[in-house]
Image (spheres, rainbow, N blue to C red):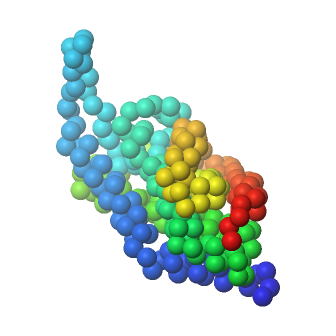
Amino acid sequence: MSKSKRLNSMMQVDFRRMFTTSRLPIFLLIALMMPILILTMTTMMDGTTVANPQTGIETAMETFTNTWQIIGTESGEGMMAMDMTAMCNINLIFFMAGVFVCLFIADDFRSGYAKNLFTVRAKKKDYVISKTVSGFVAGALMLVAFFIGAVLGGGVAGLPFTLGAAGVFGLIMCMIAKIFLMLVFVAIAVAVSCFGKNRSWLSVLLFAFAGMLLFMMIPMMTPLNAGIMHVMMCLMGGALFAGGLGTASNLILSKQDLA
C-alpha cells in the first residue's frame, strides 16, 4: 500500500471512530452549553458584592456586559486580567480539545489498537499525522459549538451583541485565528499522549502544564478585533508546532517498544 493510501486509510478509521463513539458528541454538547450557563448565571449575579472577611471591603463581581466578551477582548483591553470574564471564555475550549486528544490516544494503547496497528501495517509518522488532523477537526468543531452557544446564551441573558470597533470582520478573523491556533494545543496533546500512552492521567497533567504556559498568549494572538496578520501568525504558529512536535511525537514512538 502506498504512503498516501496508508495515511488516508488511517485517517478514515480515526474519523469513523471519532464520530461514531459518544465521546465527541459529549464534548461538543459541553462546549455548546458552557457559554449559555456562564452568560446566564453571571448575568443573574450582576450587581452582587463580595466582602473581604479580613478588611470588610466590598467589591462588585466582574460580569459580562456584552455577549462577545465571552469570545474575546480587543487588543490591549484587559488581556492580562485574571477576572471571571478573562478566565471563563472560549479559550477554555483549547484545554477541552487537548483533553479529548489525550483520552482518544490513550484508548488506542489501552485497547491494544495501537499495538496491532504498528505491528501490522502502520507507520508511526502516519499515526501522528492522523491524530493531529482528527484532533484539530474535533477542536475546531468545539470552538464552533461554543460560538453557537455564546449567541444563544447572549440572547437568553439579554446581553447586547454590539461589536464596537472590532466589527463583524474582526469577529470572523478572531474565530479563524482561534481555529488555526488550535493546531498548537492539539500538537502538544499528541506529543504528551505519545509519551504517556495508556496513562491518560499523565498525558492530561502534562498537557495542562504545557497549556497553562501558553494560556495567557491566546488573547494576544486572537483578539476580538483580529485582522489578517493575526490569522497568518496563528496559521504559521500552528504549522510550526504541528511540524516540530509531530517530529518529536514520531521520535518518542520510535524509541518505545509498542509491539
Q: Residue 46, relative to residue 247: is it above or below?
A: above
Report if residue 80 is visible in the image: yes
Q: In which quadrant is the C terminus drawn? A: bottom right
Q: In which quadrant is the N terminus drawn? A: bottom right
- Expressed as whole percent of the image width and height from the top left, the position of residue 91 reads 47, 48
- Expressed as whole percent of the image width and height from the top left, the position of residue 45 reads 21, 39
Residue closest to the far top: 55
Q: Residue 131, relative to residue 182: is it above or below?
A: below
| Residue in the picture at 46% in, 45% down | 72
Question: Residue 60 appears in which quarter of the rendering?
Answer: top left
| Residue in the picture at 45% in, 49% down | 92
Comparing 18 with 142, the one in front is 18
Q: Residue 219, relative to residue 195: is it above or below?
A: above
Q: Indicate left or right for 140 with 258 as reference.
A: left
Question: Residue 214 appears in which quarter of the rendering?
Answer: top right
- Expressed as whole percent of the image width and height from the top left, the position of residue 68 reads 40, 49
Q: How many marks?
A: 0
| Residue in the picture at 24% in, 50% down | 40
Q: Residue 214, relative to residue 170: is it above or below?
A: above
Residue closest to the far right: 2
| Residue in the picture at 72% in, 81% down | 121
Report if residue 94 is visible in the image: no
Q: Indicate left or right for 53 with 187 as reference.
A: left
